[in-house]
Amino acid sequence: MMQFSRRNFLKTGAAGLALASMPSIVCAASAKPQVGVQLYSVRKLCEKDLVGTLKAIKEMGYAGVEFAGYYGKSAQELKKMLDDNGLVACGTHTGLDTIKPENLAKTIEFNQTIGNKYLMVPGMKVENTAQGWIDTAKLFSGAAVTAKAAGMVVGYHNHQHEFKDKFDGKCKWDIFFSNASADVCSQMDVGHVVSAGEDPVAWLKKFPKRSRTLHAKEIYPGPGILGQVPEGKQGVKWDEVFAATDADAVTDWYIVESEADPNTLEKIRGCIDFLKSKGRA
């Protein structure tokens, strides 16, 4: 979905930050997840007019936005834009380097300023072995301890290869979350899971209480609107996914993502209209 060059925007920083500095974003999971949108879906519009795009997103009914780059804006500028438009930061996609021990404090500081507590790594280059994924899971587990002390969570977002690639019959996703602490969030991209031939509900049940935020995307490639799939294709069974997250009772956000056209608002408008039709927005 994204290239690391877009997310390598945070460098080294100082040590630990106190939980008390971010009281407004520390809360339990909502009874009903809120709906946000990954700004990568409309990145070309954001590049041209970030404020106008945020305003349009709010008017559609979205409650939050997830960042995938900051368009040259400071944390203070971003926070003001969000506040002015009645939105909150419901996540950021951040490079693996930004959650390493030498960089994590600076990452936390930036995200505290914008009001975000979900630090999600959306892909990473690791040694392509089972041990490579085990070692990386341990890195995430360490970062999760520091993040938790600051009222934040660290997590990983999948594509398709985490389910297709296997070592001794066990896929990368299974290896990673079997070796990561329970505090490491699984930000499941439902569309990619289904596109990989897997059942998202089964994976939600295998690693319960991990899905603090969930990427709501239809199968890929496709029209880019939830509930719409190419002729002859089986799409996401959304009612089953919603039932699973309700039962798990930890999901704070459904985050819409559309990869069909970053130059238009119509795809993400269609997605939230679908969620509204399901009583989810």
Image: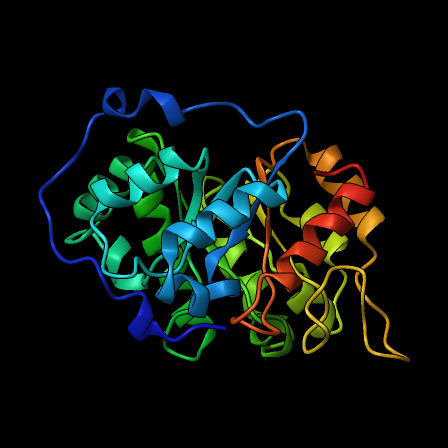
Residue at 54% over, 48% down = 57
Instruction: Identify the residue at horizontal 52%, vertical 71% (top origin).
Output: 262
Q: Is residue 144 above or below residue 159?
A: above
What colour scheme was applied to this rendering of the protein?
Answer: rainbow
Image location of residue 209, percent across then percent down: 60, 37
Residue found 80% across the figure and 40% down from its top: 243
Residue farthest toward the left in the current orientation of the protein: 14
State the image quarter where residue 89 is shown: top left
In the image shown, does 220 or 206 lie closer to the viewer? 220
Out of 93 and 55, give the one closest to the viewer. 55
Q: Is residue 143 rendered to the left or right of residue 132? A: left
Q: Which quarter of the image is occupied by the C terminus?
A: top right
Residue 149 visible in the displayed image: yes
Could you tell me residue 164's position as x and y percent? 64, 77
**What residue do we see at 24% from left, 44% from top?**
77
Side of 56 where 276 appears, left or right: right
Answer whether residue 211 is visible to the viewer in this image. Answer: no
| Residue 26 vertical position relative to residue 55 in the rendered view, above or below | above
Q: How many marks?
A: 0
**Residue 150 placement (x, y as % from top left):** 29, 31
Please tell me whether residue 126 is drawn above or below residue 147 in the rendered image: below
Task: Return the residue nearer the eye: 86 or 235.
Answer: 86
- Residue 48 horizontal/vertical position (percent): 37, 66
Q: Looking at the picture, tell me which residue is in the foreground, 73 or 18.
A: 73
Quadrant in the picture for residue 199: bottom right
Left or right side of 171 for 239: right
